[in-house]
Every structure is written in structure tokens, then in C-alpha cells.
Amino acid sequence: MLPRPVLSAAAAAGVVVVGAISVFSAAVSAAPQPATYACTPAASTTASSQTSSLVHYTLPAATSTASSSTPSATHTFESWSTFKANGVNLGSWLEIELSLTPQIFDIPVTLGLTDSVPSDEWTFSEILAASSPELLESVMVDRYANFITKAHIDKLALYGVDTLRIPTTYAAWVKVPGSALYHGNQSVYLADICDYAVETYGMHIVIGHHSLPGGVNSLNIGEAYGHGDWFFNETNWNYSLDAVNATLKFIAERSYPEAYGFSPFNEASNNLTGFATEYGLSDDARAYLVDYAKTVLAYAKELAPETTVVFQDCFIGATYWEQFFDAATDNLIFDTHIYFFEASGTYAKYANWSVCGTAEVMGAKNFPTVVGEWSLHVKYNNTLAGRQALFQSQVYAWKEYLAGGLFWTAVFTDNTTTVSGEGTKADYWSYMNLIDAGVVNVGGTIDDSAACIW
């Protein structure tokens, strides 16, 4: 049995590190936005096409203003062992989440296919496919072609972003019998964005499996609500490794495979009541996850030896997991998620001052640790004016004490659900909105508003 870890120093100090936004926002109530939908497939399924017969909601503007950036013909990439990321997630693009982008989930209701908004991508896909497989394909292809574009990458680069973390479903890589998740040409669109970001701006990329066959945490982000059968299932293990194989081959085919990290699972849990705590994984589930990670490492050494494996710590803490790996031979870094929006007793006025203390205790001793997800949403009394100080404090702390951070997320379109204090969720979770509001400096520079710069 693997030993149960002691409570982290951050938790002991009263700083609660909690999980993905979708966990705590399963019932988002966003007003439908006017849209016109067509049930015919998109005219083209190639990534070069940026038009579709399916018209949906308007995305935040991402007009390229990066003309001052001069792309280089070649790039040299710093090793993930020393690299400090200033990154952004491309969430709800190749995997869709209701709490991030609720508008797309209105499509089945708008088309009269159901009376209620689907709660997860699985149910959403089931409803559309039952009407017409071509309809599902049209909707998803439109999403992949238009939700994240090169104009978004241009804008992110101008504001100092040097790393993209890109969550995908396993269905982007392998067709699993019985799975409702759409399996198509996601990798074509992924290649288009990754190649552009890497070859034009020298960005690092982390490609992740946000879900696993059977469900890795019984949540919408793990496959579907109520799906928790990934653990201890040989069939699901094998399909997962098929997806690993396809992803690593995809990375190996890129111009700069050394620029990539691969994250084989995200926020895994076999105990939903303990999710986002140290009790989210039983001892045998921890052992199973270690075995899986070691298998992935072996695959990576064979298929994409220059690529780093990114182990998401599942809220257990990197210091616990590192005992099972060898820093001398395993090309591995850890990924921890730090949020304050469900941290008991956390007020926006005081959050800045806890950031550095949190960062100091979250890293592994022998492996780099990156903050794979973070945001500006605090549990109580959020203020629009206070966003820049909290943003800069976190950017500073994640680089000073850890291997940098990756903001969740680039595009967040729920601009109706309010938070405690001022504004809506989009004001605190959308990097594009933060850029437009002047919270992020051109070039990503940090000034004296960072609270833990003494």
C-alpha cells in the first residue's frame, strides 16, 4: 500500500487548494444568447478553413496586434527541468465544459432536441448524434476551427504568454466503443495551432488527456458525470494507452518535440466525496496511478524521448508523488492546481499576501513543479480594481518559487454568472478579458503591484 500523505503545509496553514471550476459550477444558469444554427455539416474539415455553415455565439475579439513580434526561423527551447512558464490554458476547445462556455450547450435546446441544457460533453454529444451524426460533426468541427485561432495566439504572445496547456478528450486520439464523445479530426486543428505557436513564437506546449475511458473522476471533466470506471479496468487501461501512443506519435512528428510536455491524466479521483482533497484517491488507486504514469514514461522514452511527461498531482501534492520516481532517469515534472475560489475564509483583500507562502510549499524537492491551473476568482469580496495586484502576485510567485504557472483559461464566455463582490466569472477567469481590461501588461511584465515583491 502507498502511505497516506500528511496534510500539506499549505492546508495546515489554512490555505485551501481546490479543484477545477467545473466541479463547483455544475449548475450554471447563463441566459441563452441569440444565435442561428444550421444542421448541415461544415463545408470543410481541414484546419485551414476558418469558416463554417454553423453560426454560433460571438467570441471575444482576438484581433492580432502582435505585429511588433518578429517570428524566428528557428528556436532553441529551454529544458522543462529549468523552464519557468508564463502560460495559459486553452480550455473548452478540444474538450467542452458547461461552466466555461455555456453557450455551446444551448444548441440542443435551441434546435428543439431537448428541454434541458446538457450537463456535460458526453450528454451533449449523445443528444446531437441521436438527431444526426452529421449534426454532431458539424457542431464540433465548427468549434475546433473557430473557438481558438491563430489570432488568439498572436494576442497571447504579445502579452508575454510563452506556454500553452491544451486539454483534450481521449476521443481526440482513439475511438472507444460505446463512448459518446466525438472522435474526429481534432488532431488536425491541434496541429495547426501548436505548429503556429511553436514555430512562430517559440512557445512551449503541454498536451493533456483531460478525460480517460470509463471516467477518471466521476465528473464532467473526467468523461461524464457519474462515470468513474477508469480505475482497475484492463479494457479502459488499454484504450488509454492507445490514446497515449497516438498523442506521443503526434508530438514526435512536430518540428520541435522538445518544446512539448504530455500530461496523461487530470485531477484523477476514485472518491468523489473527497475530490480536491488528500482523500480523493484511495491507496490502491494511488498505486494504480503510479503504475500508469510509469508505463506512460516508458512509452514516452520509446516514442518521443525529447518530450517531458507532466504528472498532475490530483490535489495530493508533488512532494508525495515524487518518492516513486527517479529524477536522474525520469523525464518528468509535476503539475499542481491552485485556486482560491473555494478556499474557506479567503477574502480578495488578503489573498495576495498568501500567494507566496502557498507557492513556497507546493513544489517537489527533486522535480520541477508547475502550477497547471490558477485564476483570479477568490471566494469572498472580489473587486475589479484588485485583479491586477492578484494577477501579478501569482505570476511572480509561481515563477519565483515554482516552475511558473498556466492561467485557466484563455477564453471564458460565461459573462452572466456573478461572483462574490464585483463582476462575473468571465472577469476573473478569461485571460482575453483580462488583457482587454488592462490587467495584463504588454510583454507580461511584472511591476510593483505584486504583493510579495518585497
Image: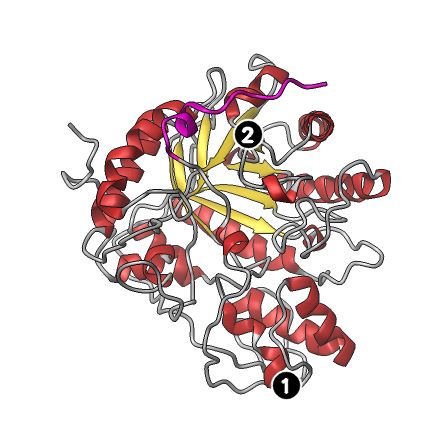
Left or right of 438 on screen, residue 190: right
Placement of the N terminus among the 4 image quadrants? top right
Magenta span: predominant SS is loop
Residue, far front: 345
Relative to residue 288, is residue 258 drawn left or right? left
The residue carrying mark 1 is 111
194 vs 219, nearest the viewer: 219
- Residue 446 in view, yes or no: yes
Q: Which is in the foreground here, disc 2 or disc 1?
A: 2
Residue 215 drawn at (x, y percent): 72, 48
Q: Residue at x 23, y 53 (%)?
A: 439
Q: Do the residues labelled 2 and 1 touch (CB within 8 Å)?
A: no
Q: Nearer the viewer, residue 54 or 124?
A: 124
Regarding mark 2 in the picture, which secondary structure is present there?
loop
Give amino acid for label 2: Ile
Quadrant in which the C terminus appears: top left
Residue bounds of the magenta highlight: 1-15
Question: How far across and how far down the image is residue 88, in percent?
Answer: 41, 48
Judge whether 349 appears above or below 51 on screen: above
Measured in 3D between alpha carbons, the distance from the residue under mark 2 to the one under mark 1, in whole angstroms, is 43 Å
Check disc 2 and report the residue beneath it: 316
Which residue type carries mark 1? Leu
